[in-house]
Image (cartoon, rainbow, N blue to C red):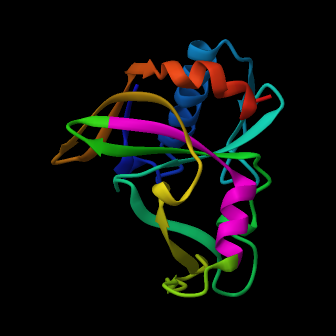
Amino acid sequence: MIINVNKLTDLKSGHSIKAEIAIMNTICYWYDLEPKGVTTGNSPGYDFRINNTTIELKISSKGEKGLIEIAKVDGSPGGLSATKSDLYAFLNPAGNNVGKLRLIRTLELKQHYSKVTDGFIETETVDDKIGSILAPFNIRNFDDLFIAECYCEFTDDGLHYDTHTFQPNNYARSMIHQYIR
C-alpha cells in the first residue's frame, strides 16, 4: 500500500484504516506476532491490537520533531489524555527517502508530558471540531524501539510511504517482546 499522509484525515475514504491495517500486518509479519484487529471510526482509545498489546499509530510528514496532541482545548480528553493504548507507533520520514517506524511506551509519553509546562499550542475550535492542545514532540527524548524502515518520498500530492518496502530491524527482533506481549 502507498500511504498518502494528506489522505489520512479523510475518514470517508477509508485510507486511514487501510494504513492502520497495513502497518499492523507488517509488524505481525516481520516479528511473527498475531494481529487482533483495528478499531473502527475515529476511536480515541487505540488504533489496533497485536497479541495482547494495544497500539496508537501516528503517521507524520515531520521528521524526528513535530507535535503531539495532549488534550482538547475545552478540557475534555483527546490525544494522549484519551488513549487507552499500551504503545504509540510513529512512522516518520528520516531523510534520504527513508521512513522509520518506531515504538514508544504510552506510559513514558504520559510521564514526560506531565512534566512539560511550556511550548503548548492551542488550535481553534471550528464548528463542531473542538480545538486541540498540542505539545512539541521530539522522538529523541524517548526510549524508542526502531522496528522497521520503508521507502518514502515527498511528491506534489504530499508524503507517500510504501508499505511493500518495509524491512525489519535486526535489533528489534530480540527486543520486540519487551514491547509487544
- Residue at far left of view: 156
The residue at the point 33 percent across, 45 percent down is 93
The answer to whether residue 38 is visible is yes
x, y percentage for residue 73?
A: 63, 85
In the rendered view, tell whether residue 39 sits above or below residue 18. Answer: below
Which image quarter holds the N terminus?
top left
In the rendered view, tell whether residue 141 sits above or below residue 41. Answer: below
Viewer-closest of 113 and 156: 113
Q: Quadrant of residue 166?
A: top left
Q: How many marks?
A: 0
x, y percentage for residue 18?
A: 53, 32
The residue at the point 36 percent across, 28 percent down is 150
Which image quarter holds the C terminus?
top right
What span is colored magenta in the figure? 99-114
Examine the structure image and report whether residue 86 is included in the region drawn in magenta: no
x, y percentage for residue 164?
A: 39, 18
x, y percentage for residue 110?
A: 71, 65
Viewer-closest of 177 and 120: 177
The residue at the point 59 percent across, 49 percent down is 143
Examine the structure image and report whether residue 110 is included in the region drawn in magenta: yes
The answer to whether residue 44 is visible is no
Q: Is residue 86 left or right of residue 166?
A: right
The residue at the point 39 percent across, 61 percent down is 65
Q: Is residue 19 left or right of residue 111?
A: left
